[in-house]
Amino acid sequence: MDWREIIEDLWDDVTDRAYYIFAVAILILFPFILVTPPSTLPILNIIFNGSRIPVLSDIYDFGYQSGLFGENVWIINIFSLCLIWAIFAASWDFVTGYSGQVSFGHAAFWGFSMYVAYWVAAGFHVNIPIIDLDLGFRVELEPLFALIFGALLAALLAVFLGIISLRVRGFYLAIITLVIPLILNSLANTFVELTGGNYGLQSDVTRVVPLPPLGDLFDETHALNFYIFVLLVFFVAITLMMLIAFSRVGLAFQSIREDEEAAESLGINVRNYKILAFTLSAFFAGIAGGLYAQWFNYVSPTYLESSYSFQVIIMCVIGGVGTITGGIIGAFLLTILVNVFLKNVFRGVHGMDMLSFGILLIITLRYMPYGLARSTKDQKRACVLGILFALAWIIIPSREGWGVELFSSILPNNGNPTDPLSKLISISVTSILILIGKVDNLGQMLSTLTLDNLLTFIALIIIFIFSIPAMIIFLISEIIGIFLFEVIMGINLGEALNKAKFLICVVTGIPFAFYLPKIFRTIRLRYWGVWPSVGRYEPD
Amino acid sequence: MSLNTSQVASSGPDENILLEIKNLSKHFEGLKAVDQVSFSIKPAELIGVIGPNGAGKTTLFNLLTGFLKPTAGEIFFNGKNITGWPPFKISKIGIARTFQLVRPFRFLDALENAMVPHIPQNILAKSSTLRNKAIWSLITVDLAEKKNYPAFILPHGDLKRLDIARSFAVQPRLLLLDEPFSGLSYEEAFRIQRLIRDAHEKGMSIVIVEHKLKILMKLVERVLVLDRGRLIGEGSPKEIANNVEVINAYLGTEAKEYG
């Protein structure tokens, strides 16, 4: 194989850019499809003239009334959560992917920042008793500034810890960083008057995005306001991280990751650069932590547990270590996987999220060891296809019988499997799960596990393993299979016609996913007049 | 004029000596890797360091570039005592090195590899300046065509030249090359020889550790011979080829070929 082909496959930034631009457009437009922009955001009111985006929102309304979509607030909140995790994952990637210093304890910074932001926002009295004088003073900041202040203090903690711990490398550094959140956790459990102990801290005073007058957390306006706030913070944080990562400082970080001694022999001050990377990373992790606490409006020692550190590592590894975008992709994939799919597909089964994380991690490491963002063109396309495929599956299903019923938990008619095959499969799968000892409630399992739930889950895994041809074969065989069963079981033809919609979605989705980069190239050639180059630098 | 220069020479550091090593020793728990070595290097001198395996050649380089701290002895560069300085500081003062095995930044492309040594000097410069400098240092080693290729797909010969390009980019007054010809064909070795000669003509002092004596003896002006950490011989290639102690320790009966 020619070198140039290998590089084009690995470092095809143009294909990436096309998908990224598409994703950013969705992120910005998506809430306005769902909800009317609230009057608290005048700029958006001017842009959209106080209404929702015309055609798209009509489609959404149609879907909602016919029971295809879930509640708006729920989806918006899930997306807010995705964005927060994305910032956290990107911050981890910054220190480990870019400068190669393995951190297994990133939860320390995000948890620490949560507490600091809470204290400062709620008003914190600093006592400095010197003999008879009390030189204490009270710190109280606006919630937004408290958020930034918390992140800054997390960065300060990172400087301190960095000076101590960054003398060691690799394995030993991993152990030291693993211990830091554990120490903070036990401290938080010890100083109960400050931290509230296990019960945590909670107050509406500390909210950056204030609650509406009725105090309803699941108010559309509140959810949308919070989403927009998080989106803005996300864009600022990611832009900053990208700017640093692509600058000469980022290049120095990368050289340290690749070969510390060679970098030092070329005049790079390795120790200072390491501490700088650690500090910047902790700052952004602190921002993510503050936002996460805002999302739940709750601070507790559980956020300092190592499961948070590991979750963020898994996200980055699946997305691709050493690329800021990889962490973001991984965060979105896993957060949606857990909150949308798993919570509906495997209701009543505990620990399914970590199990699926594990499976995904193994598959990723086997078939695309550099992660999604650094995978080959075919794999990237297969993933985009898979996401479209899953979306189509969500959009098309009817209320009962056929369909994934991913939103069945929030639909009025809590979907039970009606067709015989679904029942058969659900019984067999349930019996397997009982054998493994994973099920608490047999009845619950039987009522929730449907054929298509399971097929979606399998499809998602297959999409991760194989590239497009395997996926298309899987799709076609599945559609044919379902049609055949429809005929054999004698279910009415109207249902089958309903499925045609799904086919149409996939058929339009495939060329879209395939040709998006090509369209992007063409547009770029026409309006910029340059051929996109291979690699990160334009030819002279 | 002559009066002026003599005054400067007497007041400042000795201009005829670039690097001076006094009784340098490095002991690893009883093993004397480098033992009481003293020598000096003049500006624009081309020196070879030879010796059997384990003679302390690489340890000597590590001591000079700060990767190891000497047990005893002192290193003076340009009149400054640089004993115990960290490697990045030594690199800034003007000593560059390459490693025995090629050590590129594997996941960066050739251009980025060449940009890294320019970063400390141009931390506030325009990014185009930095890039142009990196491209220039690639041009000097004939790698400009492959600037967008990630280092992990470049062949060994290209990586050797990339290493040398990076060390040139530090703009050193003294360059330490650790086995620059190892694993190369004669053509590739000749290319690197030419690079070394060019740099030497521009006034750079170069120290080469090498086992390929046929190439080395024709290239260098002066040879230092190390054995078990001690300096056992010093002189021009001809003198070394006839030195009995060196023949016994390293060169063997084939010594006349190198003379």
Image: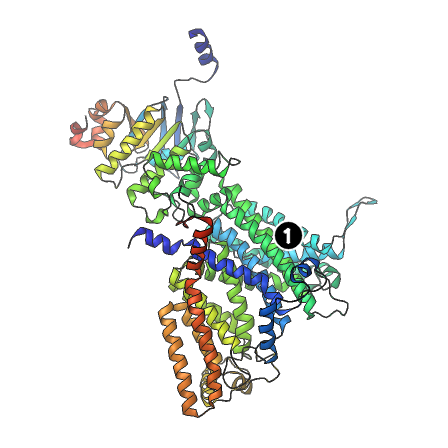
Q: Quadrant of residue B78?
A: top left
**Looking at the rendering, in which quadrant would you find the N terminus of chain A?**
bottom left
Q: Which residue sits at x=44%, y=7%? A: B3
Judge the density around disc 1: few (<14), some (14-19), many (≥20) Cα neighbours within 10 Å: many
Task: Farthest residue to the bottom: give it.
Answer: A490
Q: Residue at x 33, y 36 (%)?
A: B141
Q: Residue B89 at what x, y percent from top left? A: 48, 33
Determine whether B60 is above or below A471 in the image. Answer: above
Determine the image quadrant of residue A116.
bottom right
Given residues B252 and A370, the one toward you in this image is A370
Image quadrant occupied by the C terminus of chain A = top left
Q: Amino acid at mark 1?
A: Ala
Q: In the displayed structure, would residue A413 be above or below residue A60?
A: below
Q: Is B182 on the left-hand or right-hand side of B136?
A: left
* Above-or-below relation of A197 to B21: below
Residue A8 placed where, x, y %?
Answer: 37, 54
What is the secondary structure assignment of the residue under circle 1?
A: helix
Nearer to me, A351 or A292: A292
Which one is in front, A284 or A522? A522
Horizontal and vertical percent for residue A447? 54, 86
**Chain letter for mark 1:** A
- Say if residue B112 shows up in the picture: yes
Residue A82 image-quadrant placement:
bottom right
Horizontal relation, residue B78 to residue B208: left or right = right
Q: Which residue is mark 1?
A: A151
Q: Is residue A361 visible?
A: no
Seen as rendered, the residue at the extreme front is A526
Q: How many marks?
A: 1
